[in-house]
């Protein structure tokens, strides 16, 4: 049996500042090489913070990270200096939600890709630029030679995202993190980018963690889904398990909202109420205020975590015998 | 690019025209006419009229303006009333001296301003930032003629390391690039550099802090760049604005150095301007102001063009 590529054990992330934010509250995650997991959840549930933890991209001085994070055998939370820089982009790389903001506005696309390859592989600028051109061709950007010399603002949104993907894959990472990579794009371009990502993922044999608030997209790209709410995974399972037999009331709500004629891509706000402020560590079920089947004990203690088998988890008192709802 | 430059040039023409009108009118707005101050008070009316005709002051204003522009374009700025020498040659010498002083001061200011600003922006809200900000605020708010005098007291009077005034030994006006002359440049240049240093430091601090807060910096870290790699990107993002501010500062120093040049008796345009004002030397005043204003207009033009060449985001259409 192969070792898992990613292991997160009871990971917590807390931001200190004018007010404390408990952004991630005990996330457990195991990902095998080549596997794709989607993290599904509404805005503010801690998806981006979870991804950034894997790259240690959170502001060093005001972030407190607890638990254990291992990627490809390395203890991510204790990496620093050059080892951390080698991890970023070399082992794990990331596609951001808005490539317009995530690319340097005053460097050309070719230079930005070449720079990453030169940094990780110690090759010449010439070789770096050759790799950049090769990557732009692989992500099927029209006239790649011309795009090499283009600045981000000179390209369309879809092309920028392709360039971002080319950059992220240029050093052959083992794990690709994609943070809502299609949210900023038109519907038709969204589909093209999703298809491209799926294809490249197979071609490069990488694992991928895909963050989205769109169930349709999660089903489209992933093997497994983790549903996130208020900094916790409330339910995980294969795509089939999540769609066919959801057990957490939040997952059910999401699915129902999606089935009842919700347009694909609509935000997950079809469940009445709003997620909790994350100012204190949760001592009860975070979903209780919006839950239709809650009981008194949901508000006095944290619900039990029920693991059915590896990869299938539900955090709810009704996990075993589904409530009549 | 070329069309941008041409367009920018075309925009400069009306500005230059306006500036020339103002300079021309200066002489005519001042009470009396330019001759009153040189003619003896008891000069006969006939003599006054003859002199007026001789200098063309009896013609209609637009004609006078036209003739004045023609002469100016040929490099004839008239004759200094106080010294009787051509304004153009007085100005030429002074410009050379001021340029030297201003360029050196701007370079010193830019170097230290960037250093302080960068460190402050990079370590924002730390004690280093507060120290650097403190230094630059002092730089902006201390009266520089006062600073100049303090430096003179310390380095000339007390320590006797550097000369206090003039541009050469014994007040000689002929410059040479040797230590005997360069010594004279140090104190005024350092004093003057404090102004651009403070402003550039503040600009660069704000710039760096703003750039570092942008998401692309996360993007750079995410692809594995080390601190130096990120630094390169910050510099390239900050460069167009920082250089533009430096250019404008140079412009201000070229014209705005009356006090410092007077404190150090540095024979530059500021010193000349001061003399022209106190001696009511209108031709000299007019010529100096005209040339300084045109300098500033040209500098703005250059700054804009250079900035557009450095920054791919500036629309060149
Ligand atoms: N750098 C930060 N400093 C303080 N709070 C943050 C920071 N980044 C994210 N947060 C907070 O953490 C919570 C989760 O954010 P995020 O992971 O971005 O949510 P999303 O699921 O929409 O990606 C939010 O309440 C957000 O305000
Ligand atoms: S634990 Fe209770 S409140 Fe929370 S989701 Fe389950 S039933 Fe609802
Ligand atoms: Mg997010």
Image (spheres, coloured by chain):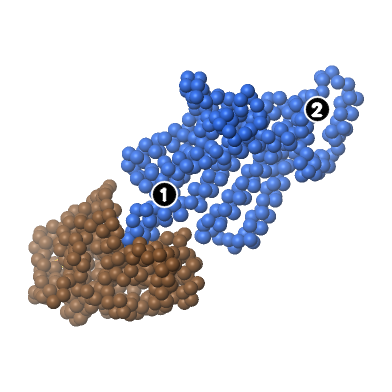
Q: Secondary structure at mark 1?
A: helix
Residue sitting farthest toward the right: B46
- Secondary structure of the residue carrying tag 2 is loop
| Nearer to us: label 1 or label 2 | 1
Q: Which residue is mark 2?
A: B35
Q: Judge by depth and name the residue closer to the eye, B220 or B282.
A: B220
- Return the chain for callout 1: B
Q: Position of residue B48 (x, y in %)?
A: 86, 26
- Name the residue nearer the viewer: B100 or A15: B100
Question: Taking A157 as reference, is B295 above or below it?
Answer: above
* Marked residue nearer the N-terminal end (1 or 2): 2
Q: Quadrant of the N terminus of chain A?
A: bottom left
Q: Nearer the viewer, residue A155 or A71?
A: A71
The colour assigned to chain A within the rendered structure: brown
Q: Looking at the image, which residue sits at the far top?
A: B42
Locate residue A149, reporting x and y percent: 49, 67
User: Mark 2 — on which chain does it sit?
Assistant: B
> Dot 1 corresponds to which residue?
B208
| Colour chain B is painted in | blue
Residue visible at 77% across and 44% down?
B73
């Amino acid at each position: 049996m192969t070792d898992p590529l990613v292991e997160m054990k009871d990971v917590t992330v807390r931001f200190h500042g004018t007010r404390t934010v408990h952004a991630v509250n005990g996330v457990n995650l195991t990902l095998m090489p080549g596997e794709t997991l989607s993290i599904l959840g509404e805005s503010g549930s801690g998806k981006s913070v979870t991804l950034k933890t894997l790259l240690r991209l959170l502001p060093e001085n005001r972030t407190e990270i607890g638990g254990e994070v291992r990627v490809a055998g390395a203890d991510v939370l204790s990496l620093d200096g050059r080892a951390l820089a080698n991890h970023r982009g070399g082992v794990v790389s990331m596609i951001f939600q808005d490539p317009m903001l995530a690319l340097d506005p005053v460097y050309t696309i070719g230079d930005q890709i070449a720079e990453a390859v030169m940094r990780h592989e110690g090759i010449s600028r010439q070789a770096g630029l050759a790799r950049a051109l090769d990557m732009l061709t692989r992500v099927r950007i029209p006239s790649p030679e011309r795009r090499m010399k283009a600045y981000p603002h000179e390209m369309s949104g879809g092309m920028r995202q392709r360039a971002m993907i080319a950059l992220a894959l240029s050093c052959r990472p083992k794990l690709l993190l994609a943070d809502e990579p299609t949210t900023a794009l038109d519907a038709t371009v969204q589909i093209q980018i999703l298809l491209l990502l799926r294809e490249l993922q197979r071609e490069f044999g990488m694992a991928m963690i895909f963050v989205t608030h769109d169930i349709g997209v999660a089903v489209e790209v992933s093997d497994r889904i983790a549903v996130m709410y208020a900094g916790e995974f409330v339910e995980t399972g294969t795509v089939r398990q999540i769609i066919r037999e959801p057990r957490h009331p939040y997952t059910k709500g999401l699915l129902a909202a999606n089935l009842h004629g919700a347009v694909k891509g609509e935000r997950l706000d079809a469940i009445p109420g709003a997620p909790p402020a994350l100012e204190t560590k949760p001592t009860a079920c975070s979903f209780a205020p919006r839950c239709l089947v809650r009981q008194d004990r949901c508000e006095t203690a944290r619900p039990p975590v029920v693991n059915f088998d590896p990869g299938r988890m539900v955090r709810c008192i009704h996990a075993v015998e589904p409530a009549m709802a | 690019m070329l069309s941008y430059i041409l367009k920018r040039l075309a925009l400069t023409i009306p500005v230059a025209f306006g500036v020339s009108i103002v300079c021309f009118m200066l002489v005519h707005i001042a009470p009396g006419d330019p001759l009153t101050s040189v003619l003896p008070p008891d000069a006969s009316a006939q003599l006054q009229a003859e002199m007026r005709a001789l200098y063309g002051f009896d013609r209609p204003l637009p004609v006078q303006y036209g003739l004045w522009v023609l002469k100016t374009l040929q490099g004839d700025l008239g004759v200094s009333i106080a010294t009787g020498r051509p304004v153009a040659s007085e100005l030429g010498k002074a410009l050379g001296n001021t340029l030297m002083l201003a360029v050196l001061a701007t370079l010193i200011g830019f170097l230290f301003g960037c250093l302080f600003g960068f460190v402050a922006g990079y370590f924002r809200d730390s004690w280093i930032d507060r120290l650097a900000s403190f230094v630059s605020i002092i730089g902006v708010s201390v009266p520089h003629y006062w600073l100049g005098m303090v430096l003179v007291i310390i380095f000339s009077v007390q320590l006797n390391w550097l000369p206090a005034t003039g541009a050469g030994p014994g007040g000689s006006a002929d410059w040479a690039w040797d230590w005997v002359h360069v010594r004279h440049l140090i104190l005024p240049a350092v004093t003057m550099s404090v102004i651009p240093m403070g402003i550039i430091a503040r600009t660069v601090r704000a710039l760096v802090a703003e750039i570092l807060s942008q998401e692309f910096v996360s993007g750079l870290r995410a692809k594995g760049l080390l601190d130096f790699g990120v630094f390169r990107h910050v510099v390239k993002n900050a460069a167009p604005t920082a250089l533009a501010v430096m250019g404008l500062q140079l412009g201000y120093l070229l014209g705005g150095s009356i006090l410092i040049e007077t404190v150090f008796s540095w024979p530059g345009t500021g010193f000349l301007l001061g003399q022209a004002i106190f001696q009511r030397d209108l031709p000299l005043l007019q010529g100096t102001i005209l040339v300084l204003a045109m300098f500033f207009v040209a500098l703005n033009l250059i700054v804009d063009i250079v900035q557009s060449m450095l920054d791919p985001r500036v629309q060149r259409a």
